[in-house]
Amino acid sequence: MKFWLRTFGDLRLLDEQGHATAFPEKGLVIIACLIAADRASVPRVPVAELLWGKSTPSTSFTNLRSLILRIKNRQFELDRHFLSFSESRIELNPSLLSCDVSAFGVAGPEEPFEKLALLVERFHEGLFLEGISLRSIVFSDWLAQQRERQTIALERAVDIARPLAAKPGEIALVKEAALLVSLAHPQDEVARRVLIEAHDAQSEVNHFRSVFERRSRLLSSWAAAAKRPVKGAVVSTKADSPTLEVPATEAAVHPMARVPRLSLLPPSNHGTDPAAAGIVTALLEDITIGFCVLNSIQVMAPYSAVQISRQTADKVAAFEHHDVSYVLDTRLSGVDSDRSLFCQLIYMASDEIVWAERFSIDGRDLARNNRDISRRLALSVASEIERHRITRAHFEQNPAAYHRYLIGRQYFSRLTLPNLRRARREMKAALHESPNFAPALSSIARTYSEEWFLTARGDVELLKSAETFALQAIAARDDMADGYRELGVAKLQQGALDESVEALELAEALSPHYADVIADHADTLAHCSQLEAACQKIEQAIELNPLSPDAYLWTAAGANYGLGRFAEALAYIDRIAAWLTGFRLRAGRCWATPRRRVLSSAELAKLTLTLIWINGF
């Protein structure tokens, strides 16, 4: 029996009985380096540079001599001389121990699926030398190269085994390995192709691919068609002036941020229910694959996420160690057909809940619901992370501007002329602090379009101001939905229906689960007489935002009325919070239709009062 050196995950030396054996850590690193490089010996000089760096050679050689002494003493105690030392070299005796990293070398198994299974097992155990942190740039560079080489070896093994996979177990192994490659190399096209091919039979990733291909196509066509120049000036200090122009050199430059890393935590309360465990496992796998296809978020490998979720110690420290930016925490509740999945997206740096939603898991149609939930979850989380990342970037760059922006947003809760003007004043104050703050630009556009509504729709200059600020928001950040949304609303109010549809279509493509954008898109479709599509859109918005604003219900009522669905229109009107406004719509539209319905005495009384109110105005 040989000793066993474990290098993936925790670095450990195990004896013949599998028990952990004490040994100098840097000595184990030397052994791992020799085995990973398929070398029997190495000069002392590069070993000293690897462990302690090149900056102070004399100190490195002194430290190496001390380490060699400790290694010799420990090997004497074990009566196992894994390493031997001469004046200039360090040699390995490979007959005394085996190592898990050998699977990646020439001595690994030759049978394709046996090799692939072994490599997958290594990746599941953790990263190569994961817990080792040496103050040496040489070691850091070498370790990165080794991990890259191991990922390439896994990719090659996938490429060899993929055309040979015929049995269900072989196909599942190839898919699992491709997922690991994609997690390590988000841009790897081979792994992406394998994932897409593996899941095409169930159409699980077609939705992701089509959504984001459409998003890229729309952005490209918009950039090619619009080409609207942005002038270079400053914010006007006049209270009602719409003039704000972003310097082109600043607006065109978007800071390149690293791709955020996400960890999907399985529910901690599903272990006693095997059915729930199966649901969660399948769901998290689908979501992970969806993120890999999206290629916009780096996802922690499911195995590592599960291990962290089981830790009783400080999970926050574990996430920080693995550079996790966001955590998707999940919980199951209910039983059978009443089962639901609660998800919340947490930004780890500030322990902030960015987004939360509850999904119904209907046991009567589990396969379809799981697929739909995985799609909605992946797209929702991707959109929310992107929106939160953009807003955080503005906050981190200029907290004062972000603070003024938040103050201004509070005034949108009750739309009155004084509140709109207060909001506009705060947004312009934010822009004085940060001229490229796209959320503030789009919010100013909203204040002008809402003011146009509240002032009897008589001042076309308000709409032109809304359009100006919307275009500047797009120039400042062309991958945010809000600018396109405000442009679409302004174009609708000006009667440019085709341009409105184009802008709102792009806004929805950028944020597929942004309920307000979808509702505005539905309103525009209704004005374009695309009533069936409008009904579908507004129902989607109401589903995403169940406690819907009256504007959603108004759009739904109008679209259903146009289709002759008077009962549905009246049902939406009855849900409008401002009931006098709702009954005004009822009186003006539904009461005069050929399909008059019999009203109850209470409805008739309300309707009579409403008609009196209308006549009074």
Image (spheres, grey):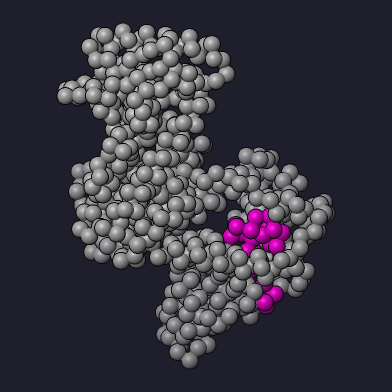
Q: Is residue 333 above or below residue 165?
A: above
Visible in this render: residue 280? no
Residue 169 drawn at (x, y percent): 21, 54
Residue at 23% x, 24% y is 95
- Magenta stretch: residue 482 in it? yes
Q: Is residue 411 above or below residue 471?
A: above
Quadrant where the N terminus sits is top left
What's drawn in magenta, residue-wise? 470-496
Q: Is residue 343 magenta?
A: no
Q: Could you tell me which residue is drawn at 52 percent across and 46 percent down?
A: 259
Going by the image, does 463 lie left or right of 79? right
The part of the image, by quadrant, that contains residue 99 is top left
- In the rendered image, residue 7, in percent from the top left (x then y), is placed at 33, 29
* In the foreground, 489 or 43: 43
Residue lying farthest to the bottom in this orientation = 594
Say if 37 sits above or below 456 in the image: above
